[in-house]
Amino acid sequence: MRGERRRYVGAGDGMGEIRLVHVDGKVIPVEFQRKHIKRMHLHVKGPEGRVVLSAPLSMPRAVLEAFVAENAAWIEQKQQQLRCLPVKQPHRYLTGETIDLWGERKVLVVHVGCSARGEGFLVRDSKVFLSVPEGLTDTQRVRFVREQYRHALVARMAEVAPSLEERTGLFVREWRTKDMKTRWGTCNIQARRVWINLQLAVKPPVCLTYVMLHEILHLAERGHNRRFYALMDRYMPDWRQVRRLLEMSPGNC
């Protein structure tokens, strides 16, 4: 395994150093992003399958390349999954469209009626039934359906939170949801308030449990250090596999 440097123009575009990492006769272009963090984080970003490795500022380049080599099989699996995904078209939420809900792809059946008040998703086998008010524009319909996702997420959070709080002895004053671009969750320790990403409503339910546990444990340990990960191991021994599942699961709302 060896790495070659590739020059690029436009350092202001937020990219890091691009290197070609050679693994078993294959070449993996990897973007190394140096940050004020303590651990390495590897991502494969779609739809083109771009490999990005975030790493501590002082970590040797050889360590980064070795980490890429160790995860080469996972990188290939993720890139293959992205290549197999159909080209994503914007949702209009009409009957016959497919949508993702709790890690499963369902066929949407829409009933339009003046009395519809956001009764939420009704799941039956491979279909999701939804009543929407009549007269909505496309934009209004998207907003309406996203609110149904929010309702579904809040309901599931209400089921999961009491168990997590009882097991950990940590209590959140307020659980909230919002659509976030770069985080699955965030914790305001002082206010004891946790925000959960709306997009978790399309992921397998265990992913929501993982993120909620991750955030609630920050009430015991602020940083991502050895003590924090020991707590994660204690309360969810397979959390690394769940995190990988979260990263690999397609879908958005």
Image: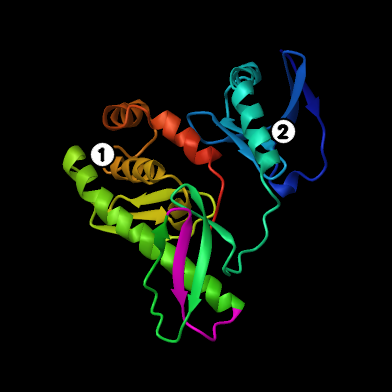
Mark 2 or mark 1: which comes first in sequence? 2
Asked if marks 2 and 1 touch (Cβ < 8 Å), the reply is no
Splitting the image into 4 quarters, where does residue 129 fall? bottom left
Question: Which residue is located at x 29 percent, y 44 percent?
Answer: 216
Residue 91 horizontal/vertical position (percent) = 61, 64
Please tell me which residue lies in front, 66 or 145.
145
- Residue interval drawn in magenta: 125-137
For the residues labelled 2 and 1, the Cα–Cα distance comes to: 35 Å
Q: Is residue 64 above or below residue 166?
A: above
Could you classify mark 2 by the number of other residues whose Cα lies within 10 Å: few (under 14), some (14-19), or many (20 or more)?
Answer: some
In the visual, does 177 lie left or right of 11? left
Q: Label 2 amino acid?
A: Glu
The quadrant the N terminus occupies is top right
Q: Is residue 189 above or below residue 65?
A: below
Residue, disc 1:
220
In the visual, does 167 lie left or right of 210? left
Q: Label 1 amino acid?
A: Ala
Provide the secondary structure element on which disc 2 rests.
strand
Residue, disc 2:
17
